[in-house]
Image (tube, coloured by chain):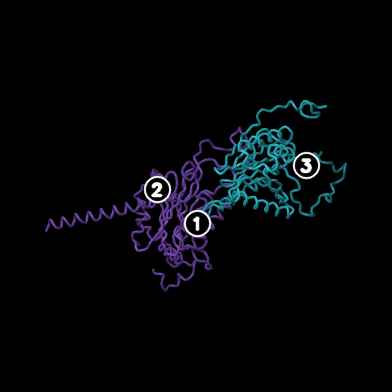
Chain colours: A purple, B cyan
Amino acid sequence: MTSIGTGYDLSNSVFSPDGRNFQVEYAVKAVENGGTAIGIRCKDGVVLAVEKIITSKLLKPGSNKRIATVDRHVGIVSAGLVPDGRHFVSRARDEASSWRGVYKGPIPISALSNRLGSYVQAYTLYSSVRPFGVTAIVGGWDSEAELAVDGQVGSGPKSGSGGKVEGAKTGGPGLYMIEPSGLYWGYYGAATGKGRQAAKAELEKLDLSSGTLSLVDGVKEAARIIYVAHEDSKDKEFELEMTWISSLDGPTKGRHEEVPKDLLEEAERAAKRALEGEDEEEDATKGNSNETERMEE
Amino acid sequence: MNHFPEAWGRPRDDVYGAYNPLYLQTTGPKAHTQSPAVTGTSVVAVKFNGGVAIAADNLASYGSLARFTDVKRLRKFGESAIVGFSGDVSDMQYIDRLLESIDIRENYSTNGNTLNAKNLHTYLSKVLYKRRSEFNPLWNHILVAGFDEDKKPFLSSADLLGTTFSAPHLATGFGAHLAIPILRRLFPEETPLESISKDEAVAALRECIKVLWYRDARSLDKYSLAVVTEAGIEIQEDQQVEAQSWAFAEAIKGYGAQVN
């Protein structure tokens, strides 16, 4: 059943007779035109990367960041309508701050994603609003060490368990993707935006579920995947923006930061080399086939 | 005695008559904090060539009771500022959470937290002044140590009234009476900052903390010491007053073991 002319796509929160919400599906279309954004959950951290299409030569290179920090340990990147993404990030920051107000500590990535999922879903329920035109990837690191409570001044009694469980394993990387419908899943590798199909194919090759990919390798893979995903819209120039969150003993100490310039440039060079390599291989195989054709002649 | 537990231990109605609820004030002006509850004592700080040193003991007193003995009253802000708190500990925790939220917000920009100690002091003094103007003061006297916008060592104080004061060496609480004279003798007025080394500043602070431990009844011999320099913050939170000598106490009437 098509949405055209049926009238079921004119208002938000209205189902069509076969159970679809067309406004949400149109929001997904908006996302599909955005620059590719990906996230990779590595064993010791999370990488976020986005293909930032340059819309004007008058924009300052490196400005207008598309990946935002929430609290200290979370990064959010989105594909789709940029202002919707900004508002989404603003809400995420409010949620993280209110969590601190109640629990005196950083919000777990799972809890933040849950709250954001609920928030986005609420925008599919009312005719007075439209759904979010973004699919957002939320990546972060939950501290594996026991953190001090915000404002804690002492270390408490030296004897007794204090209600603690010995040897409990906590913390680790978290990666979630939230869609315009409010649907969210946790992922090993997530991709959205224009080049998502190519990016997903590349992510699947990485065998992320085995939990062996290191963060630094993840950075290089992320850069390569964005370059691969850009192949289909080669006529447009783009900037690669990349951030990461490592474990507490890693390079960012559990914080969400930009990937350092030298590592980013190294990853970009490697990505370009990998692409050129592929082209040469293709040319080589073509050449061979030509030869065989000729031999047949 | 009856079998109602809420009546046990109370004046008996058959002897004293029923309690007159008019004595319970149910209306009246709204009252805010009129005195601190759990308190920290002095904070001492000295500027030196290339930085600031600051020290405070690890005690939180409940009235005259030495209640908490591992309290960290020197709090880091960003990579190059320290706030030393004396006064109410719960108000300190409130301000600490406030600073935490500011640090988080500052880090949202790509440049990171660019607020220096001077910005921080300005902000805190305004928070304190606003609260005292609402007749609901944050019961603290704070020292802010770090650098100003010209990367010069910065040290300034703000109290629960919002009063600010700056000097090459500062102390709050009892330290204002006991430590400042020592620091003035060691580093007289007009001493150029360039002539004071980090080691001299730290040694002076250790001496001040020792004297405060001798003479301030709300102090402790375990203390924290932080040094802010261009290179960052070094903070030691498990310092002990060394080489104590209580010989001077023998001759003082009413001091220590001597009762009469």
The N terminus of chain A: image quadrant: bottom left
Same subunit: marks 3 and 2: no
Q: Secondary structure at mark 1?
A: helix
Q: Are discs 2 and 1 less than 8 Å apart at CB?
A: no
> Label 1, label 3: how many angstroms apart (C-alpha)?
53 Å
The x and y percentages for residue A220 are 38, 49
Same subunit: marks 2 and 1: yes
Q: Is residue A236 above or below residue A46?
A: below
Which sits in the foreground, A243 or B186? B186
Q: Are discs 1 and 3 less than 8 Å apart at CB?
A: no
Q: Which mark is residue A218?
A: 2
The x and y percentages for residue A153 are 63, 41
**Please, which chain is the residue tagged with disc 1 on?**
A
What residue is disc 3 on? B4
What residue is disc 1 on? A117
Nearer to us: label 3 or label 2: 2
Nearer to us: label 2 or label 1: 2
